[in-house]
Amino acid sequence: MEEIAQLESTLLARIDELETPRDILKAPEIKQLYAKIPTLDPAQRGVFGQKINGLKQALERVVAEKESQIEESASVPLDVTAPLHINSKLPKLLSAEQGTVHPLRQEIAKLIEIFGRMGFVAEESRELDDQYHMFESLNFPAGHPARDEYDTFMTVQKDTNEEAFVAPAHTSTMQNRILKKYKENLDKDEPIAAVVPDRTFRNEDLDARHEHTFYQIEGVYVAKNVHAGMLIATLQKFLEEYYGKKLEVRVNPFYFPFTEPSFEFALSCPFCEGTNPSCKVCGGEGWIELLGCGMIHPRVLQMAGIDPSVYTGFAFGCGIDRLVMMKYAIEDVRHFESAKLDFLKQF
């Protein structure tokens, strides 16, 4: 037993000399101890074996501590604000060349750049909002049947007297805030011109064309003497810039509570121009229903403190996912949220 105690001290001291601390568990002295067991009196063998196991457990604990210290000392401090190439000791797998911007974020940057050249500022939306900005400020009175078209996610309120919050079904929830924020522009004879590209949510049945989480871009423009022709020209110019070709457009009457008149906006197919009956984008019809738009309803302007007898404006909302799918002929909207590297690496 004294021999085991002395050996433990010897082996513990030897650990610091080893490049790989775990090698101490293979020390020949330990094997020699096990070889002695058959030579002992049967009554002593059990106790002797337990002592050897105790020795190994003590060594295991010290080895684990040493390995942890080595790993900690070998770790490279990482400045998360610095370019990755500055952290030269990082594994090659983490080099800057390995990362890419998500395709939707790439395209959102392009949309903002195009609208920026057209005089629009970009604003962020919210991922949780109140029902006033989701509905009331957009001329959806309480109990209005048009609310049913927006099958939204809502929070569960413990106090039934409190109104549930909403995961916005459209970035139009920012329209009232934008009108109020930039209302002073009108006093300087400058327009209110803003776009809101951000994430939205709807309780959808998932398929190749529908997702519960997607991106939408809202556009708002208000000034004196704004008319529907300006709306159509703005959208046509934007889409031609985005798709890089001349496009024909058309509008059909529609209904939205927050615009009057309201339109569905369609553009000529940027791929086949109606010449290919098997076109996956337009089905050979040559036209694609793309977005909703219209002249901002006078009540919406009034709720933002803007006089509709002096100022008019237009608004539009378009699904960014759909814009990108059309641009790159992507067949399934679910790819964007799938985290599939074979899809993402194409961008």
Image (cartoon, helix red, strand yellow):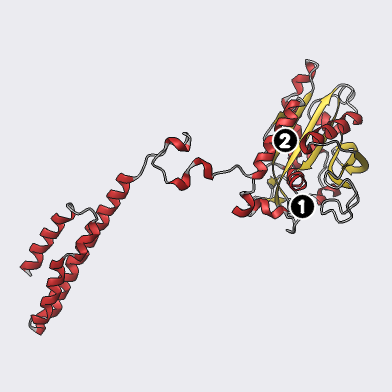
Q: Is residue 79 above or below residue 45?
A: above
Amino acid carrying label 2: it is Leu
Q: Tell which tag, 1 or 2, sits nearer the viewer.
A: 2
Q: Is residue 302 above or below residue 90?
A: above
- The tag earlier along the polypeptide, 1 or 2, is 2
Q: Residue at x 90, y 49 (%)?
A: 275
- Packing grade of label 1 (10 A; few <14, some 14-19, many >=20) is few
71 displayed left or right of 18: right
- Where is residue 210? Give x, y as percent: 75, 54
Residue 151 got which mark?
A: 1
Residue that badge 2 annotates: 111
What is the secondary structure assignment of the residue under circle 2?
helix
Q: Residue furthest left?
A: 2
Q: Residue at x 78, y 41 (%)?
A: 318
Q: Write down the quadrant of residue 47 in the picture.
A: bottom left
124 displayed left or right of 250: left
- Packing grade of label 2 (10 A; few <14, some 14-19, many >=20) is many
Q: Residue at x 61, y 54 (%)?
A: 342
- Where is residue 44? Give x, y as percent: 9, 79
